[in-house]
Amino acid sequence: SQQGEEDPQALSIQEGENATMNCSYKTSINNLQWYRQNSGRGLVHLILIRSNEREKHSGRLRVTLDTSKKSSSLLITASRAADTASYFCATEGGNDMRFGAGTRLTVKP
Amino acid sequence: GAVVSQHPSRVICKSGTSVKIECRSLDFQATTMFWYRQFPKQSLMLMATSNEGSKATYEQGVEKDKFLINHASLTLSTLTVTSAHPEDSSFYICSARQPTGYGYTFGSGTRLTVV
């Protein structure tokens, strides 16, 4: 079963704009990760945030985690057409990893 | 870094036949591996947890007699889709927990098409 929900399900923006995706989960976690997937391909690991962290940055990516609300957000700044992909959050808790429903991001040139 | 190799990347098989997918950890030992299935435009669904030397743990709704998992060594887990049907056509991805204890390494996935 999936861990939680992501919103929006689909997001379309212009190149240069920022993209924000949200993820909610249901159970206690050790960490939360964000992955990117181009159509029909494997997963690319973007960033991991541990349960005791609140915010993390990596290049144009900014991730926040609110364990009290069981939610996380991924911000991609200054988006590029090459950022077009599906983005998934995944929570690691206990002995496995489960994925959210994903957000399909389209960045128009 | 930790690398997981998954083969084949694509396979087409006839309905009623069986297909085996391999997942290997190349430079680390993985006592636990995971198998996911992804239908078009959907998320990854955990199918089962593969434990080295013991039986796999299947998620609710996943038929263990149809999706046979073998984890005979610390570097290899296999998923066999038995008596495949067109509805089994999907993208299958394996993963292994990284030796550091944080994060998972994913294979590149297998696109299965049953005709």
Image: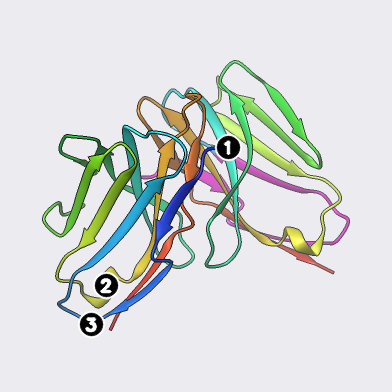
Foreground residue among B13 and A10: B13
Which of the chains bears the disc numbered 2? Answer: B
Q: What residue type is labelled 1?
A: Gly
Location of residue A98 in the rendering, given as x and y in whole percent from the top left corner: 42, 40
Q: Give the range drawn in magenta.
A: A1-23
Q: Which amino acid does label 2 sit on?
A: Glu
Mark 2 in CB contact with mark 3 (< 8 angstroms): no
Residue A98: mark: none
Q: What residue type is labelled 3?
A: Lys
The answer to if B43 sits in the magenta stretch is: no
Residue at image mark 3: B14
Residue at image mark 1: B1
The quadrant holding residue A37 is bottom right
Mark 1 secondary-structure assignment: loop
Residue at image mark 2: B87
Q: Which badge, 2 or 3, comes first in the chain's sequence?
A: 3
Q: Tell me the CA gap for discs 2 and 3.
A: 12 Å
Foreground residue among B45 and A19: B45
